[in-house]
Amino acid sequence: MSELTLIIGNKNYSSWSLRPWIALKQADIPFTERMILLFDENWDAEISKVSPTKKVPVLIDGDITICETLAILEYAHELYPEKELWPTDQRARAVARSVSSEMHAGFGALRNHMSMNIRKDHTGRGMGPGVAEDISRVSKIWNDCRKNYGQNGDFLFGKFGNADAMFAPVVSRFKTFGVELDAVSQAYCDVVLNTQAYLEWQSDALKETWIIESDEID
Ligand SMILES: N[C@@H](CCC(=O)N[C@@H](CS)C(=O)NCC(=O)O)C(=O)O
């Protein structure tokens, strides 16, 4: 079987890195992780060696390099189909890919105004233009998925999978920004926040001391 290396950024800040990391961990897929500190003095030199896009996450499997979070999640699914990172049902799988792609390409306001910063309590802040609409759309997705596809577990499509991984940083932001949610969305956040993989990522993030000024709000 392949020997996977996942290159990630700082756990406190790197929302894109959290996505494939939590998918692989929660599915018990073996991989080695390597961190490159975002925007520190060696960032440019180090990231240039491993990532043609100069972004994290990057998955390396022997002689191939996979950039872009969704491509990494697709590859993990293909390597380990038995882990069911996408739902087995074709129609559910199409919806899981649809909402994951929507997350990948959208929610700019939420991302801009509510940066992931696991160490911080930003309760009541971050409600810039467009954020309320993004929160409302995310909540609608979560409610619809839980109602239509979530019967066999606590996650969006039952068991934890790639769609949950795509939304994990949003769950983290909703917690640190103290976003008030409907009951279904809040229950969903609570189960994601209590997965073994998220707790491990959070514990590592809380121990980090590096500061990225542009992701801090005073
Ligand atoms: N579209 C990329 C986004 C990756 C991304 O923006 N990663 C951030 C860290 S969370 C990064 O590497 N930023 C470095 C930069 O923009 O120079 C993906 O899906 O993986």
Image (tube, rainbow, N blue to C red):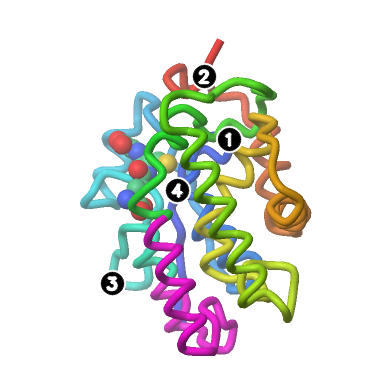
Quadrant of the rendered structure where residue 25 is? Answer: bottom right
Mark closest to the chain's N terminus, 2 or 4:
4
Q: Nearer the viewer, residue 148 or 58?
A: 148
Query: Does dot 1 land on a helix, a strand or a loop?
Result: loop
Say which amino acid is labelled 1.
Asn
At a point 42% along the width and 83% down the height, the residue shown is 78
Say which amino acid is labelled 2.
Glu
**Residue 199 visible here:** no
**Residue 112 visible here:** yes
At a point 59% along the width and 66% down the height, the residue shown is 144
Say which amino acid is labelled 3.
Asp
Q: Nearer the viewer, mark 1 or mark 2?
A: 2
Q: Residue pushed farthest top?
A: 218
- State yes or no: discs 3 and 1 in contact (Cβ < 8 Å): no
Q: Does the magenta stretch include residue 108?
A: no
x and y, in percent, of residue 28 in the image: 65, 73
Q: Nearer the viewer, mark 4 or mark 3?
A: 4
x and y, in percent, of residue 49 in the image: 26, 48
The C terminus sits in image quarter: top right
Range of the magenta residues?
Answer: 74-102
